[in-house]
Amino acid sequence: MDSNAARPKGLAQISYREFTRHYKKVMQRNPGEHALLFVHLTGPTSPMEEALLVLDSQVFKDVAERVLVSNGKFGSLTTMPERGFALFVRDCSERRALQLARLFRHTLQNSEIHAAGQSFYMGISTGVVTVTQPIDLGQLIDSARHACLLARQKGHNRIEIGALLAGL
């Protein structure tokens, strides 16, 4: 019997507090490699900024859910400030996390979004960091956020693999 058959697949969008509890539980109970992707969405800025943020969140959640399910993975997602998301994917190697990030990018790049009579395409920058041992979640998120910032500095729709930052 496949040990992955009983594992949930898909996405849980949860509060930061629940995200922290989930991370600690996974790290204590599931030895192995796990990935944290810090995602920053870009799109047009306008007076509808708040409406776009809500739309961004729903669009990214839908894309993440489809990609994770189709790849047999489960992740937990929490919203971060400034159009950012932290996505923790259990049992996920760096190579696999990079593949997921590329699928997110490809899907979003090719999806036209319609809101308030306007059409636009959303951009995505992603920082990827993997972890094999329990560390402080804040340090992990800061490391992935730093990788995401490096990706954003390189241009639109980039992915950067990062390392754990020391001394945070």
Image (spheres, rainbow, N blue to C red):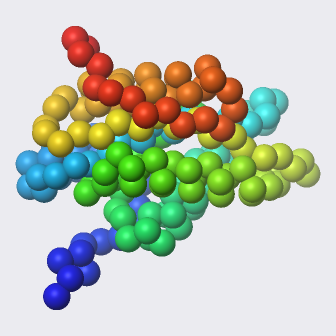
Q: Is residue 86 above or below residue 99?
A: above
- Identify the residue at the far top of this view: 167
- Is residue 88 visible in the rendered image? The answer is no
| Nearest the eye: 28 or 151 | 151
Going by the image, does 143 lie left or right of 42? left
Q: Position of residue 91 (x, y in %)?
A: 25, 57
Q: Is residue 141 above or below residue 124?
A: above
Quarter of the image where the C terminus is located:
top left
Q: Which residue corresponds to the image point at 53% horizontal and 67% vertical from the top-left?
A: 66
- Is residue 8 visible in the rendered image? The answer is yes
Q: Which residue corresponds to the image point at 68% horizontal and 27% vertical from the top-left?
A: 155
Q: Position of residue 147 (x, y in %)?
A: 45, 26
Going by the image, does 116 lie left or right of 98? right
- Identify the residue at the far right of this view: 117
Q: Which residue corresponds to the image point at 36% horizontal and 24% vertical from the top-left?
A: 142
- Identify the residue at the far left of this view: 28
Q: Which residue corresponds to the image point at 29% horizontal and 30% vertical from the top-left?
A: 140
Going by the image, does 26 lie left or right of 156? left
| Nearest the eye: 111 or 45 | 111
Quarter of the image where the N terminus is located:
bottom left
Quadrant of the image occupied by residue 40: top right
Q: How many marks?
A: 0
Q: Position of residue 162 (x, y in %)?
A: 39, 29
